[in-house]
Image (cartoon, grey):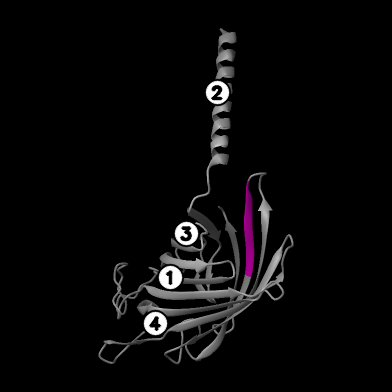
Amino acid sequence: MMKKILKGIFLLAMGTGRLFSQENSETKETKEGRLDFTANIQNNHLWRGLIITDKPVVMGNISYALDAEKKWKVGIWGASALADDKDNTHYKEINYYVQYSDGRFYIGLWDLYNSRNINTAVAADDIFSYSQRRTAHIIDLRTNYTFGPSFPINIEADIMLYGGANAGEVILEADGSYKKNRYSTYVQASYPVISGQKVNLDAFVGAGFALNDKTFLYGNGKNSFDIVNVGVKAGKVVKITDHYSLPVSMMAMWNPSNKYARIQLAATVF
């Protein structure tokens, strides 16, 4: 009886081994398609010098390449905090985008929707509302360019083109009707101080201003132009197994305009 049991276990193990071998073989033969998604975890969410939330965040991005070279992509980016902030609001965001990148030049049109703490007196708490006066969506034009290998500085310029009632981007007339948008603009220069090493380091400085008003989103609401984002970011890849490595980073950020600073730890899970 014992021999039969051992024989059965042996045959089951052999069959399972062949199954895993077949699955691994199929995995190796699987072609890389145009659809992809990634996931990140961070101890907070910092964006253009702003503290979006101080709570840990899970982020996901799903994209589909429109061409074989994967230069054109459409996608959905989303994030959610793992806990409420101290004001008892909860950060949740979903964005849609279309973008082009050839490795050095990038341009993208993003539709941003952050549902945290929407003030319904000035903005619509409705993800399907694109009203010029009340939409909480922000249509954001993003561009950046990296110069040649001899001087690989990256220049970024982003403009809020439409919406943003909840963020103060929409200016109203005295009677409450729509008057104009601020067109808050963010520009940044970043440079790889250390590259090609086990730990790489980038330094960056970012400024904000408005194209259509005296104040802008990223600053303290007093100046027409201000430095809003200064910092360094270190990154490395941690080997977990022979088949899995974990890209991690640490960033230190200061906003001189708003007079605060933060440390961010982040990991790209897959």
Confirm whether the magenta stretch covers residue 60.
Answer: no
Frontmost of labels 4 and 3 is: 3
Distance, label 1 to label 3, CA atoms, is: 19 Å
**Is 154 on the left or on the right of 210, as rendered?**
right
Q: Earlier in the sequence, mark 4 or mark 3?
A: 3
Tag 2: Cα neighbours inside 10 Å, few (<14), some, or many (≥20)? few
Please, what is the three-letter code of the amino acid marked with disc 2?
A: Gly
Image location (x, y in percent) of residue 86:
46, 69
Q: Which residue is mark 2?
A: 15
Q: Is residue 266 above or below residue 30?
A: below
Distance, label 4 to label 2, CA atoms, is: 63 Å
Q: Earlier in the sequence, mark 1 or mark 3?
A: 3
**Is 180 on the left or on the right of 223, as rendered?**
left
Q: Which residue is mark 1?
A: 110
**Helix, strand or loop for disc 4:** loop
Residue at (55%, 21%) from the top-left corner? 12
Tag 3: Cα neighbours inside 10 Å, few (<14), some, or many (≥20)? few
Frontmost of labels 1 and 3 is: 3
**Is 161 on the left or on the right of 135, as rendered?**
right
Q: Is residue 42 above or below residue 260?
A: above
Q: Which residue is mark 4?
A: 168
Please, what is the three-letter code of the amino acid marked with disc 4?
A: Gly
**Helix, strand or loop for disc 1:** strand
Distance, label 1 to label 4, CA atoms, is: 18 Å
